[in-house]
Amino acid sequence: MNEINQIVSDIKNGVVKPIYFLMGEESYYIDKISDFIENTILEEEEKGFNQTVMYGRDVSVEDIIGAAKRFPMMAEKQVIIVKEAQDLSRTIEKLVSYASNPQPSTILVLNYKYKKLDRRKALYKAIHKIGLVFESKRLYENQVADWIRRVLGGKNYQVEPKAAQMLVEFLGTDLSKINNELQKLITILPPQTIITPQHIEDNIGISKDYNNFELVDPIKKGTGPLKLLYLGRITQVKGLHLLIQALKKMENESVELNIYGQGDGTNYEQELRIMTMPMMNVKWHGVVGQNEVLNIMNRHDLLCLCSTICEMSPLVIQEARKANLPVLASDVYGNIEQLKNGKGFLFKTNNANSLYVQLKFLTSNKHKLEDVKKRIKQPIGFDEIAKKYLHEYKKLLVK
């Protein structure tokens, strides 16, 4: 937040950079900075000839350079904003020639969402030297409630902890989605209101009956959605696309999917995010700390592992056992050994239809999850293993 405040303060004081490269997983801050530049730098009468908005999917790097080299018309500056610039990720390094010698009268803004520049390469170094590179990092889940309180506090509202947590539970860590709902509340409720869970339920439609604060387990009662968890790297070989394809076939089923993790810099994660935009039952949460894993697992009914390649005894299965969380996984080596004999559920590797069949079965037979929980054995910790070895050694010494 301090970095964002400094950027805004500098622009207000007339200290502007020739290039603003806004990148990272959290699109909210990228949009905020970009919109501020779009609305602030030029006077309204100057914008018609001197402010251009482009989209990465429609232009090339050469088009951007050509536009940036033009001189402004009857103004001191021109502003060029490239939205969805991540669509140019394969050729973005070509911008280095311009970044090394930018047009002084041009302010070039690139919104590079869900991706990052390689800090070792020439483009990053060139922009960092004369412009500004801002990385918008996704908040951890345990930071979002405080963010909600700060946003509402700045608008002269307060929020009860339970109400803030309801928003986090329902909307995840997507700040843009959360901000949209906060704006609804601000429009409806008068200033100085202390926002309660009832306000959330009445005005946003999130039921307070299905959240972590209630002493109710909807799955055990046979009601409520089946809460699926994906936790891991978001790469092609991890097969998250298979899970999303399976969920698309379950439009009328009561299923929710929460996705935790980050990609590897390819377009894979971005493509999946776009694919899930219309799917209200899919929520993206970004990276989480190791200390949060157990709490997250405790809020779900089923962990889904969709790897398309061999897994050597995945650690996440051990973590799921610790949380007494059933696992549905592809039948690759490593998963089979841990989940066979009724200790979990398996589907055919790289087969979205097989995954769909299993999910369909579990939504109709939720009691099967409880059956598996009874068979789950807690993983043996290193301390326990050491004690067992020590005990055996002592027995040998006595002999």
Image (spheres, grey):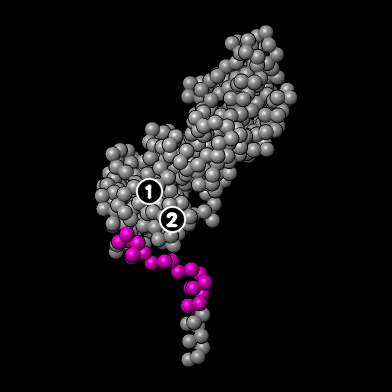
Question: What amino acid type is highlighted by mark number 1?
Answer: Lys
Residue marked by disc 2: 298
Q: Secondary structure at mark 1?
A: strand
Q: What residue appears at the point 54 percent right and 46 percent down from the top-left corner?
A: 161
Residue ID at (32%, 43%): 254
Q: On screen, 154 above or below 61?
A: below
Q: Residue furthest top?
A: 74
Q: How crowded is the residue under tag 2: few (<14 C-alpha within 10 Å), some, or many (20+)?
A: some
Q: Name the magenta segment's main secondary structure.
A: helix
Q: Residue furthest bottom?
A: 399
* Residue drawn at point x = 60 percent, y = 15 percent: 51
Q: Which residues are magenta?
A: 370-389
Q: Earlier in the sequence, mark 1 or mark 2?
A: 1
Q: Which residue is mark 1?
A: 227
Q: Would you place residue 34 above or below residue 350 in this image?
A: above
Vertical comparison of 193 with 291: above or below: above
Residue at 46 percent of width and 39 percent of height: 200
